[in-house]
Amino acid sequence: MVENEETTFIETEPYEVGFGSHYDEHLKPLVNDFESRRQEAVKKFKKRLVLSIVGAPISVVLSFIVVFDVLDTDPESFWSEIYFWGVLFFILAVVGFVYSSIATYKGSIKEEIFPRIISFLGEYSFDAEPGNQMERFASSQITPSYDRETSEDLTTGTYKGVSIEFFETELEVRQRTSRTRSYKTIFDGVVISLSVKKSFEGHTIVLRDRGLVGNFLKSKFGTSLEKAGLEDPKFEKMFEVFTNDQVEARYLLTTSFMERLLDLNDIFKGKGVQCSFYEKTLLITIPSNKDLFEAGSIFKREDFIDDAKALLKEMNLIFSVVDILKLDQDIGL
């Protein structure tokens, strides 16, 4: 039985104005139901954790005795290697079993609650598992070559007539040795695509500074665009710009825009924001360790308030990029 506690969304930021009533209508009625689900998920997690702490070590020890004592397997043999890989797989399976109830609960939050939060902003859609997205951005010249993509949490909508796409992605390259094949992550972060109504025909990209050698190689081999400068020396030390239209690049990359890029980088705890103006689109990529669109802690009472505040803050920053660049206006060059 879940106690029916009174919950209230307190509006503390300008972009939250009006969300209190939205919360009362669209989220608050679901609090007790999800709190019951949360408690059940935690109960299963704790029970499975105890079983695993007791059972897993015993299983590993017994299997070790059987393989190397009873069957007298040579520790240097092929079968010994197979055994150790089997133990690793078993441990991973146990971990998955223990956390499965938590994963299921958090998945229900993303599928059922997050769309309700985002609907406050207008006609927005949210897809937790959208499939591969990055191939269509290859011509931006800021996406790396990769062999495997994992994208999630695609949010699409319109703000002041500007189309917005926003999702997380991990890009990996394949690594091979004589005996194994593995993958190395080369990008893990946020991708933001914004339509642009400004009248520009060129292609301008902003890359994080790679140092003298990296910049030389990029300018010679990595792009068909020419190197350009920035207005502010502070940003010159942090970014490298390449363009096929020097005048247009200076028009686009104002000091206020560069400052907002850094703000965007900070809010997502990024490690090198990059962007590309091309084909009437502004594409922004932000390497980040920050997981977006993730449910809060399962070990605290559910009310959706922290989730809502985080999502609204992140979306507001994206909207502010549209406002500062006046992407909703065709003001010409």
Image (tube, grey):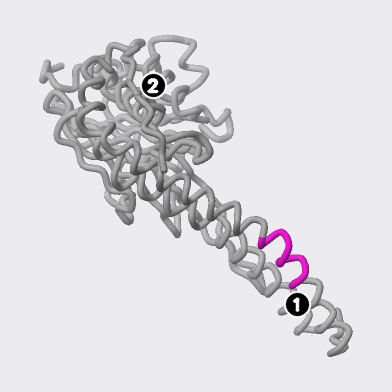
First of labels 2, 1 by sequence position: 1
| Three-letter code for the amino acid on which mark 1 is drawn | Glu
Q: Is residue 217 magenta?
A: no
Mark carried by residue 261: 2
- What is the C-alpha distance between the residues marked 2 and 1? 49 Å
Q: Mark 1 = which residue?
A: 81
Q: Position of residue 264 (x, y in %)?
A: 40, 23
Please tell me which residue is depicted at 64% across the width and 56% down the height of the picture.
49
- The answer to the question of whether label 2 and label 1 lie on touching residues, with beta carbons closer than 8 A, is no
Q: Is residue 54 magenta?
A: yes
Image: magenta residue range: 51-59
Q: Is residue 169 above or below residue 165?
A: below
Within 10 Å of disc 2 (Cα), the crowding (few <14, some 14-19, many 20+) is many
Q: Is residue 197 above or below residue 166?
A: above
Please tell me which residue is depicted at 86% across the width and 88% down the height of the picture.
70
Q: Which of the two discs, 2 and 1, sits closer to the camera? A: 1
Residue 204 seen in this snapshot = yes
Query: What quarter of the picture does the C terminus occupy?
Result: top left
Helix, strand, or loop for circle 2?
helix
Please tell me which residue is depicted at 86% across the width and 84% down the height of the picture.
74
Please tell me which residue is depicted at 24% across the width and 14% down the height of the picture.
17
Considering depth in this image, is 21 or 151 the residue closer to the camera?
21
